Amino acid sequence: MSETAQNANSETQQEVSHEITLYAEPIAKIGEFTITNSLITSWIAVIILAIFFISVGKKIKRVPRGIHNIFEIILERALNLADSVTGDRNKTEKFLPVTLALFLFILVSNWLGLFPGMGTIGFIESQGGESVFVPLFRASTADLNTTLAFSIMAIALSHIFAVMVIGGRKHFNKFINLNAAKSIFTEYKNDKTVIIVNPIKIFVGLLEIISEFAKIASLSFRLFGNVFAGEVLIASMMAIIALVLPIPFMFMEMIVGLIQALIFAMLSLVFMTIATQDHAEEH
């Protein structure tokens, strides 16, 4: 065989490398906007939910029948579960539409990552002289950008609800305790202990600010870590035996996906409930 033929044969037999990355791989660009494989999956999840609820909504009747009875039971159970956290049906009716929407989107996103073709349908591109396989789809919750965005939105909404329920001044005073700072000078003559107690109150308020950032980190990394670890686990099992071995782990990941969606929604509900309580009511 000639040297030219050998080179051609070696090129055709060149191995294509693929590693599961922590970041979502870029698929295309629209101007300066990058479309990633996790973003495509997010769009698919939104489309699935939109089509489902539009089709169900068109068939709603005053007297529910069939599958509508099931949805009414699920909604009633969701309201009761939320009531056990908020302790107030009025708060539940404000918070549940947001937390339930988060739950459904995260659940669909988690389960989409288990569908055939996720992680295996893609294209090959050259990176640094090496052929690399880039998957076209990736579970959106296996991208830290997505989970971080959800976490920021959940915490931001908790502050918005707090301002709506208890007022902006009371909510702001939880973090920057101006009343405690002011009372050091106004109450010192009558109560000498304020010079010790009130600085502690001010410091606790600053700790509350740090805790808000900790909530964002906790929500985002918990969801991302569990979903991403599940993808790595299934990919490892497929590398050993592609047909049979991954099946039990896929069922396990379906349960994990459900639990993680529920945990995220419930924690968001808890944070909203805590934020809408007066400082004295919290104690």
Image (tube, rainbow, N blue to C red):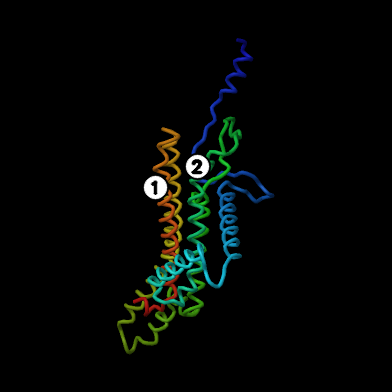
Above or below for 6 versus 137: above
Residue 7: percent from left, percent from top: 60, 18
Residue at the spot x=46%, y=77% of the render?
A: 90
- Pointers 2 and 1 in contact (C-beta within 8 Å): no
Mark sitting on residue 252 = 1
- First in residue order: circle 2 vs circle 1: 2
Position of residue 54 relative to residue 18, above or below, is below
With respect to residue 219, does 177 lie above or below?
below
Q: Residues within 10 Å of mark 2 (few under 14, many from 20)?
A: few
Of all residues, the one furthest to the right in this rendering is 31
- Quarter of the picture holding the C terminus: bottom left
| Callout 2 secondary element | loop
Real-space Cα distance between discs 2 and 1?
22 Å
Mark 1 secondary-structure assignment: helix
Residue placed at 59% from the left, 30% from the top? 129
Q: Is residue 31 left or right of residue 192?
A: right
